[in-house]
Structures are given as C-alpha cells and as structure tokens.
C-alpha cells in the first residue's frame, strides 16, 4: 500500500500568515487540499514586534487550513525572512586518496562537512546550506561520485540568521503542537517556484517585494548562488503616502492599491484621485502626481539598493533571463518598466507554473507557500539520491536547543 | 564581509626607505599653502613622520626644505603654477598618478595639507586624497579656507573642493582663514598672521601625533583612530584646547571652545554609534578629578555620553598644564540635501512638512562667523534653527528598529530624504 503524508507550508509574512496543506504521496505527486490565512498585525519589516499577536494569527491560520483540508498536518515547512538574514560563500576542500582516486560518498561528505564547518558569531545559526556545485581538480562537475580525481571542492552559499528570532518562529509553530520539519528562506521558496529550470540555468534574479521586506535570490547554472533581504516593502510606500499626504495608514493603503503607479506619467499632472473613493463626508482629493511621485521615489530607491547589492552580477551578460518580480508590490502598474529602466535587464512579473491550477493560488501572495511545498516535494524526492539521509531540521533544532 | 575595507592594499614589501615596524605617517602638502605649512612643520621634529610636498610650481618646491618634493603637471603648466585653475590642478594630478601613488606606499596615516581656493590645492588635492585612500592609508586632511575678501569664485572653488575631499578623506578638518585672522593682533605683520594660521595646522597635526605616540595611561592607538574614522564621507569634528595655571581645566575647555578648527556639525546631536575620541595630556600632577571634570564637560557639550573613547597621557615636562583634544566623525548627519530645514516646533509626529532645501552648505555661514559666534553655535543658534528629528518622520515604523542602509534610515520616506516637494491639493 502506498503511503501519503500531510504537510503544511507556513509563511508568517508581514501582511498575513498563509498556510497551505498538501497531501504528498510516495510516488512524488502532491495535492493541495487546504488553505488558511489570517491578517497579521504584529510584524514590521519581517520582524516580530508582538509575539503573542503573531502567534494567535498563525494558529488561527493553521486551524483554518486544517479545517478546510479535513486532515491534520503532520509536518510543517516554514519560510523565513527579515533583515537579520545574511549569507556568505564558503567552500570545503578535501583530498581524494583512497580506492585509486575514485571519489566516494565519504569523500563528498568530508568536503561538505568542511564547507559547513565555518564558525559563526555567537547568537547566529545556519538556516540553510545551498550547494552551488562541485569542482573536481578544478573542473566543474555535477555529480563527482565515482569519478577520478585528486582534489574535491564543494562550494556552498550559507544563509545565516539570528538564533533568537529563529527560536521565536519555531516556538510559534511548536505552540500549536507541530514540529518544524524544515525552514526555507522566503526568497528561495518563491524563486524555486517562479523561475523555470531553463531560466535558472541561464541566470535569473527573482525579487519578491512583499509588504515588509524585499527578498531576492540569484540563480545561475540551476543553483541559487546568492540571496538577500532588503527591509523595505509595500508598507514603506503606504507609510510614505500617509506622511506625504497627511492621511491615515489605512486610507493610504487603499489609495496605494487603487491609484499608485511606479512611474510618473504625462497625464498625472491634471488628474485628481480621491482618498476614499466613494465621495463620503471626509473624503478628499489629491493630485495623482503627488501619489505617483512618492511611490516612484520609494520604488526607484529600492531598485537602486538592489542594484548596488548585486553589483556586476546584475548585467545583461550575467543575467540573460533577467529579473522576475513577485510579491504584492509587483502588482503595482508600471513597476516592470521602472525596474527595467534602473536595472537595465529584462524584467517580467512572475507567473506560477501550470501545475498550479487553482486560479486563486496563482496570485503573487501565494508564491512563497507554493514554493515551500514545491521544495518539500523536491526534498522528499531527492533524499534517496543523495545517499545518506541528510540531517533535517530536527537535527538542526537539537543543535539550537541542545 | 567581502568588502576589503579602507585599509587594505598595503603591500608589506613596498616599505622602501621607511623603517619597519610601528606606524608610518606622512604629512603631504599640496599646492602653495600646503607646501608652506609642511615647511613650517619641518622645523619641528616628529618621530616616524615623513614629509612631502606636491605642487605645480617649481619655484615654491625649489625653496622648500622638505625631503620629498614632487612637481606635478609639468606637461600642463610647464612648471609654472596653475594660475588658480582647479581644472589644471586636477589634470596635473591625473598626469602624475603613478608618482603620487608611490608617495603613499606603505604609509598608514596621511595628513594632507591643502589650502583650498587656489588651483593646485582645490584641483589636485582631492585627486591626491583619493590616491592616498586607495593605497590603504587613513587620510586626515587639514584645509585652510580662503578669506571672504578673496571673492566668490575662489570661495566657490573651495566649496567644491571641500565637498570632494569630504567624500574621499576619512576626516577633513577645515580652518577658515577669516576665523583664524580675527584672533590675530591687528598690528601683526603679514608674515606673523600666516604663521599663526600654520600654527593651528601644526597644532592639529601635532596633537593627533602625540595622541598616537605618547605612551598614555589610557592609550588611544591607531586602531582606535581608524575605528572612529573608518568610513569616509562624514563630517569631522576636531578641536584642541590648552590650559595652564590655577584653573587649568577651565582654561583648557575655554581654549577648546575658541579653537578655529572646531567645527560643529549642523545637527547638534551626535548618535551613539559615532565615536568621539577625547585625549587628555597633562603633567605628572594630572588628577583623576581633573579627568572627570573634562570628560563631563565634553560629554555634555557634544551630547554623546555613550560614544566617548578616552585617552590620557602624561608628559613629564607638562607640569601644571593640560591639553584636551577631541576628534571624531559624525556620520549620520542629514545633509541639507536630505533633510529640508524645518522649524522644530512645527513638526507634529505625523505631519512633517518638507520644504525645498534652502540654506547652502554650512561652510559658508561659518566663514562670516567670529570665533565667539563659532563658540555659541551649538548653543542658542542651533536651537532656533535645528533640523527635524529623524524619528518623527518614521510614522508607522516608529516602534521598530531603525532601518539603516549605508547610514540612511530607510524607514524615513524617500521623498523626504530627497527633498521632493509634494503638493497636497
């Protein structure tokens, strides 16, 4: 009899907590069977401000998702964002000197251990190790197992986060009586979903502009080679509008969704836009030009920061597949034009792959959770190929709490 | 992490004739005024300090007693001076890049002396500073600014050059001639007057030098200085004061107030992360109470209780005397471009009113000031015309951590920082 397991993907985002429940079968197929979400008010810029409120929101979302699925979640995959995340490259080298210079699993393991053994600052913890590739005697290769050589090098991009913050997130899930199976950083979750294999091979940058943070991941040769978080997101546009037009956050948020554009156009000068939109008492009108100027300034700055962070990686030669934008802010009109103007590479909005059939799930707000599921499925599938089962999140957790 | 930092690129093999070990310091004068200042410093023997002069004028260099003289821009000016053209000065420096770079090989600390307003100082100065920074040295520039009387073009030129220097150097210490010469006795000869200006530069260099070299009770070493000045681009705060006799602490602090090099940043508050080095040198009779008194007064004056680094050194021949030197960089000072000045009282937390930038760079107003006014600046005048507290512009993000990116708080609306005018109706 074939087994199935029920997994839950949880994204504790600055705007809302989104939970998807999926049934994964032994053969590697997956059905999304439940969904739950709740509005999150306890977070700013991807960091938890009020843990109790975030915890309640998350529990409510998980409960809803389980209810709609009619099943209980067995394992949780959690996404992570925030400006405490950072990453660095480190590679491990080992000499091959047994079995007539044929690379064995033990050799690979030794190189991998070397790459992962860099000591971190106290209070920091590894969140994810992303393998960039192997190099056997200086030659790039996909799978060195069984090949001949004398020196094996493995390069990793390590993502590191703040231990305290990580503990908080895990304790929220544990508070519902669930274990966290694995943590995937948000940028990689949405990136792995939105970029096709072909794009990842050529080189592509996936930029997820969410409510509180902008997460990005750079792919090259099918691997994620660089990730980062900029603590600026849609909330900043809202706040800028509220301060600039002297109105409430809530009204500014509505105005942003209704009218804001990423670039200033010719017609903006004459047009007026009303604050609430239904001509009720207390409604007022603003020049559209002002709204767009504020939005433009913020987004332009964001792309400039992004450009500076990536440096020469961000060029037409290094990034043939260009940039994929996702996240709530990516729905802003004219944002792709603005990004193209500043980054000087082709820019497109991300689209979920065809296997996401449910129309509602194709929106950018689900890219991260869908990516989590996609990763979870991939992981479950990949394990036997890698030989020894890799130490999962549970092991890492023991490291943290032990 | 991957950033190599401003102090990389030192090649240990390229020390040349400079003795190994210890700190290598070079004082480099650029242009006429700079060379003159170096000449005068030459008379005082400082250990481990090397002197060099760079100019476009072969005449000034020929008469200079300095060991390393570099004539630049021979092909541009034919060995004559630039005649006040900053463009020529820049071209001259560009043409001699390699030779200038050689000057800085293996040097840890460079004092760059350049009189701004002329051709060589304003044109070549920033280029020389850039090369020095790139060679891995910590660069501290002392720049006399021209008299107001010398005319607007000169002043403009000095302003442009100053901005360029502030971008590259780790610290730029300005010395407005107008302020200096107000302190000079009216009956002094021209020679005496200029000697007085050079005296201040000498004093500045000397006080930093002695801070680094005199073995102290609490030592301020080169690394401390590096840390305090690690990022180029900030506004530099520097001042030194001397006192002797009965109430020497009081006298030293008053003298510090009068120091024409002391140039307070436009926003009166310093941030916790800005480091301010305070060095006290006194005789063997220096008491802890005196040290306390000085530190209290300084932390109150500069409003930065958390960020003081203190050094104290004893000089055997300094009985009954005291010198107080303060130095630091104010990094996050909102420039007039980023924050439009708004009267503080009109700022309601949720309603900032950005006005287009009005006041010109701060240096201009300093030039009209008497030393007394310079002393008062951080008092009364600052309060009337202070900059909005950045905290009040954060709105929704008030309670969250500051969102710093290269010294800028990203939570403050971009349009406010850029000074974009927003029409509401």
Image (cartoon, helix red, strand yellow):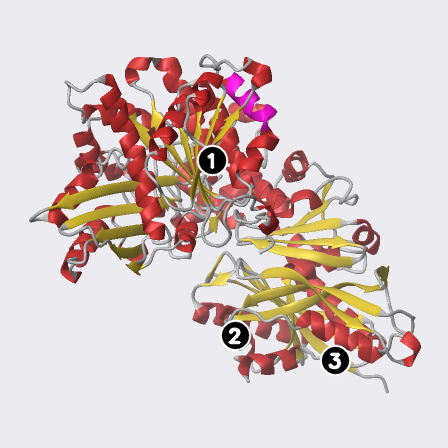
Q: Which mark is residue A5?
A: 3
Mark identifier at residue B167: 1
Q: Is residue B254 magenta?
A: no
Q: Are marks 1 and 2 in contact (CB under 8 Å)?
A: no
Chain at numbered mark 1: B
The quarter in which the C terminus of chain B is drawn is: top left
Graded by Cα atoms within 10 Å as few (under 14), some (14 to 19) or many (20 or more), the crowding at tag 3 reads: some
Distance between mark 1 and mark 3 Cα atoms:
60 Å
Asked if residue B275 can be seen in this view, the reply is no
> Which quadrant of the structure image shows residue B181?
top left
Residue at mark 3: chain: A
In-image side of B52 versus B390 (left or right): right
The part of the image, by quadrant, that contains residue B154 is: top left
Quick check: B332 above or below A30? Answer: above
Position of residue A226 measured from the top left corner of the image (x, y, whole percent): 68, 56
Q: Nearer the viewer, mark 1 or mark 3?
A: 1
Give the class, few, some or many, for how many residues have Cα within 10 Å of label 2's Cα (few <14, many ≥20). few
Element on which disc 2 rests: helix
Please determine whether, in this image, residue B177 is positioned above or below residue B1.
above
**Would you say A238 lies left or right of A309 here?**
left
Residue at image mark 2: A167
């Amino acid at each position: 009899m074939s087994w199935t397991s029920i997994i839950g993907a949880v994204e504790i985002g600055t705007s809302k907590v989104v939970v998807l429940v999926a049934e994964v079968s032994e053969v590697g197929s997956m059905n999304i069977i439940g969904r739950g979400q709740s509005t999150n008010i306890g977070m700013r810029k991807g960091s938890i401000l009020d843990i109790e409120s975030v915890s309640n929101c998350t529990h409510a979302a998980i409960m809803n998702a389980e209810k709609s699925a009619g099943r209980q979640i067995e394992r949780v995959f959690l996404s992570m964002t925030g400006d405490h995340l950072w990453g660095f490259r480190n590679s491990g080298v080992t000499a091959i000197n047994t079995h007539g210079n044929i690379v064995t699993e033990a050799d690979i393991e030794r190189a991998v251990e070397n790459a992962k053994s860099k000591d971190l600052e106290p209070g920091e913890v590894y969140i994810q190790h992303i393998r960039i590739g192997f190099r056997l005697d200086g030659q790039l290769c996909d799978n060195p197992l069984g090949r001949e050589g004398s020196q094996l090098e493995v390069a990793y991009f390590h993502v590191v986060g703040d231990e305290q913050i990580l503990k908080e997130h895990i304790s929220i899930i544990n508070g519902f009586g669930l274990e966290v199976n694995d943590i995937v950083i948000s940028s990689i979750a949405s990136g792995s979903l939105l970029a096709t294999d072909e794009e990842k091979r050529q080189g592509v940058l996936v930029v997820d502009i969410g409510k509180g943070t902008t997460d990005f991941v750079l792919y090259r040769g099918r691997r994620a080679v660089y990730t980062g978080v900029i603590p600026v997101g849609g909330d900043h546009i809202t706040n800028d509008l509220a301060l600039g037009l002297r109105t409430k956050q809530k009204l500014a948020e509505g105005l942003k969704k209704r009218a804001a554009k990423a670039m200033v156009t010719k017609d903006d000068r004459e047009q007026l836009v009303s604050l609430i939109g239904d001509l009720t008492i207390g409604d007022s009108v603003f020049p559209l030009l002002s709204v767009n100027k504020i939005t433009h300034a913020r987004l332009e700055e964001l792309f400039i920061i992004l450009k500076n962070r990536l440096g020469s990686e961000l060029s037409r030669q290094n990034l043939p597949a260009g940039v994929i934008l996702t996240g709530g802010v990516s729905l802003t009109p004219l944002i792709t034009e603005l990004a193209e103007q500043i980054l000087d590479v082709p820019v497109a909005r991300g689209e979920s792959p065809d296997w996401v059939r449910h129309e509602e799930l194709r929106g950018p707000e689900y890219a991260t959770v869908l990516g989590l599921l996609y990763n979870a499925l991939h992981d479950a599938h990949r394990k036997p190929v890698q030989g020894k089962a890799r130490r999962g999140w549970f092991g890492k957790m023991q490291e943290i709490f032990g | 992490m991957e950033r190599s930092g401003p102090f990389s690129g030192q090649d240990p093999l390229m020390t040349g004739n400079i003795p190994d070990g210890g700190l290598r310091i070079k004082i480099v004068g650029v242009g006429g005024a700079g060379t003159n200042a170096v000449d005068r410093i030459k008379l005082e023997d400082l250990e481990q300090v090397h002197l060099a002069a760079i100019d476009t004028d072969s005449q000034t260099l020929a008469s200079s007693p300095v060991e390393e003289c570099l004539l630049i821009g021979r092909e541009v000016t034919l060995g004559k001076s630039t005649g006040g053209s900053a463009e020529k000065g820049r071209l001259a420096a560009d043409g001699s890049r390699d030779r200038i770079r050689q000057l800085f090989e293996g040097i840890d600390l460079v004092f760059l002396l350049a009189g701004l307003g002329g051709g060589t100082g304003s044109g070549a100065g920033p280029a020389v500073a850039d090369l020095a920074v790139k060679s891995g040295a910590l660069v501290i520039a002392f720049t006399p600014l021209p008299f107001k009387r010398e005319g607007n073009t000169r002043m403009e030129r000095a302003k442009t050059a100053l901005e360029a220097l502030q971008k590259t150097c780790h610290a730029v210490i300005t010395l407005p001639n107008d302020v200096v010469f107000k302190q000079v006795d009216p009956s002094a000869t021209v020679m005496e007057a200029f000697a007085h200006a050079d005296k201040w530069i000498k004093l500045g260099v000397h006080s930093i030098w002695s801070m680094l070299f005199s073995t102290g009770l609490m030592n301020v070493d080169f690394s401390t200085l590096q840390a305090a000045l690690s990022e180029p681009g900030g506004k530099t705060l520097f001042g030194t004061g001397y006192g002797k006799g009965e109430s020497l602490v009081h006298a030293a602090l008053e003298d510090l107030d009068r120091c024409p090099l002391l140039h307070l940043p436009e926003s009166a508050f310093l941030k916790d992360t800005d480091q301010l080095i305070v060095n006290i040198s006194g005789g063997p009779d220096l008491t802890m109470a005196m040290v306390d008194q000085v530190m209290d007064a300084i932390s109150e004056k500069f409003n930065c209780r958390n960020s003081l680094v203190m050094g104290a050194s004893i000089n055997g021949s300094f009985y009954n005397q005291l010198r107080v030197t303060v130095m630091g960089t104010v990094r996050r000072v909102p420039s007039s471009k980023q924050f439009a000045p708004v009267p503080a009282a009109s700022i309601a937390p949720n309603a900032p009113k950005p006005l287009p930038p009005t006041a010109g760079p701060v240096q201009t107003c300093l030039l009209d000031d008497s030393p007394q006014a310079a002393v008062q600046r951080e008092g009364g005048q600052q309060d009337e015309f202070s900059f909005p507290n950045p905290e009040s512009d954060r709105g929704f993000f008030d309670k969250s951590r500051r969102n710093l990116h290269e010294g800028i708080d990203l939570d403050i609306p971009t349009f406010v920082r850029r000074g974009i005018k927003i029409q509401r109706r």
